[in-house]
Amino acid sequence: MSVAASRYAKALLDVLYPAKAEAGREQLLQFASVLSQHQDARLLLENPTVSAERRKDLVKKIGDTLALDPPVQNFLGLLIDRNRLDLLDEIISTYETLLDEKLGVVRARVTSALELDTKQRDEVVARLQELTGKKVRMESFVDPDLIGGLVAQVGSTIYDGSIRHQLQAFRNNLTQD
């Protein structure tokens, strides 16, 4: 994480927290999604040879279409003025981390052999919240090599309940005797 991205993320969070912090995160993600879908727009917005006014007009049009709150639109305009829109993805990532810290949320990366349905996701989140004592924001991934079960990573802690892990442990027990 760059120092500049960290400063911008912290400044935006200071402006939006607490009332609009979650909404601001969603709006930044929406804006970034538009830019990833329209690379020509991203290239234009990140091009310092194009006038700042022209780039800010485009940000305003996109912002109006997405119904971005004024502080978020102003923030994006500031990034244009300072030719720092290239840091947007890093700023969003840092913003999410800072927001999670303020809200007492931990991120969990859960990998399962099959796609989890809504009920299973809720059960995994509830169990991880019991284990960590914090709110959990879960990202889920699928890895058929696990055979069954799942692996959850929260920070540096790994909870491995996969069948692959259990088979490896069983094999290790057999070879040690």
Image (tube, helix red, strand yellow):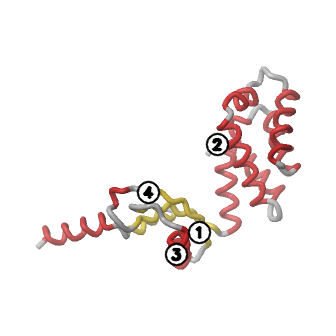
Classify residue 81 by image quadrant.
Answer: top right
Amino acid type at mark 4: Val
Q: Residue 80's x, y, as percent?
A: 80, 34
> Label 2 vs label 1: CA separation?
26 Å
Q: Are marks 2 and 1 in contact (CB under 8 Å)?
A: no
Horizontal arrangement in the rendering, residue 49 relative to residue 151 (left or right): right
Residue in view at x 66 percent, y 69 percent = 104
Mark 2 — residue?
2
Q: Considering only order in the chain, which callout, 1 or 4, is on the residue closer to the N terminus?
A: 1
In this view, the residue farthest toward the left is 177
Residue at disc 4, secondary structure? strand
Mark 1 — residue?
136
Residue at disc 3, secondary structure? helix
Which numbered disc, 3 or 2, marks the residue closer to the eye?
3
Q: Considering only order in the chain, which callout, 2 or 3, is on the residue closer to the N terminus?
A: 2
Q: Is residue 144 above or below residue 34?
A: below
In this view, the residue in front, 100 or 61, is 61
Mark 3 — residue?
123
Q: Is residue 127 above or below residue 158?
A: below
Q: Considering only order in the chain, which callout, 1 or 2, is on the residue closer to the N terminus?
A: 2
> Label 1 vs label 3: CA separation?
12 Å
